[in-house]
Amino acid sequence: MQSSDPDTLAFYARQAEAYSRRKRLPAEARLEGFLARLPDGGDILELGCGAGADSDVMRQRGYRIRPTDGSAEMAALASQHLGMPVATLLFHELDEIARFDGIWANACLLHVPRSGLPDVLQRIHRALRPGGVFFASYKEGAGEGQDGLGRYYNYPSRDDLHAFYAAFHWQAVDISAAKGSGYDDRPTDWLYVTAVKPA
Ligand code: SAM
């Protein structure tokens, strides 16, 4: 099992400054939909937070946030931006139990090698409280590979994602799709997955 991709993490370490300065399309609609399902002021873990823009929104909305990123360089930038500690946490290091009402993982679990994804999903499921909500987005495709910038992607289909998530007990798994882009400016088919842990 491979839990993370060293080349991808090295990319974000090198590019942290540039990545944090880029014009980022806001995830607002999806973020609002996610927050609407959580208790007011609830506990949210953000995985792969990058420069911390989404955690900033969640904090302003009154949630208790725990921003994290697997790149120490990116976590340091997020910490500067947010003015609070941001933990360096690789996805497969998550070991908390029933601690969060929501887990937000925008455009980051797409870097988990396919062989390591079941373990990461299991950790996320375990870290959620009953009734907790988990959001993640992926670049749709037909098999793992690297992009033009040398980053690893798991490139799942909808069926792949349903199969990965089906290994754990969710009350609901909703997958929606939209066309967009990313840091590489390439046309991208995005898949957005919201899963709810049984209450
Ligand atoms: N979520 C942010 C956003 O929407 O702008 C950042 C997305 S960026 C495409 C992916 C982030 O995932 C990077 O900040 C990177 O450092 C982090 N990352 C990649 N592999 C990781 C791993 N194995 N564990 C934790 N974070 C990881």
Image: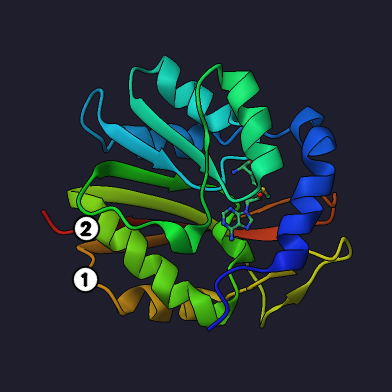
| Kind of residue sitting beneath label 2 | Lys
Residue at position x 46%, y 64% from top?
A: 92
Q: Compared to 95, does 63 lie above or below?
A: above
Q: How is the image coloured?
A: rainbow
Discs 2, 1 touching: Cβ within 8 Å: yes
Q: Which residue is mark 1?
A: 169
Residue at position x 60%, y 75% from top?
A: 113
Report, in whole angstroms, how far the alpha carbon at label 2 lies from the one at label 1. 7 Å
Between residue 55 and residue 84, name the one nearer to us: 84
* Residue 197: assigned label: 2
Classify residue 49 as left or right of residue 13: left
Residue at position x 64%, y 21% from top?
A: 80
| Kind of residue sitting beneath label 1 | His
Between residue 78 and residue 172, name the one nearer to us: 78
Quarter location, residue 23: top right
Where is residue 117 shown, x and y percent of the image? Answer: 48, 73
10 Å crowding of disc 1: few (<14), some (14-19), many (20+): some
Q: Is residue 182 visible?
A: no
Where is residue 104 shown, x and y percent of the image? Answer: 44, 45
Query: Which mark is first along the chain, 1 or 2?
Result: 1
**Disc 1 C-beta below 8 A from ligand 1:** no
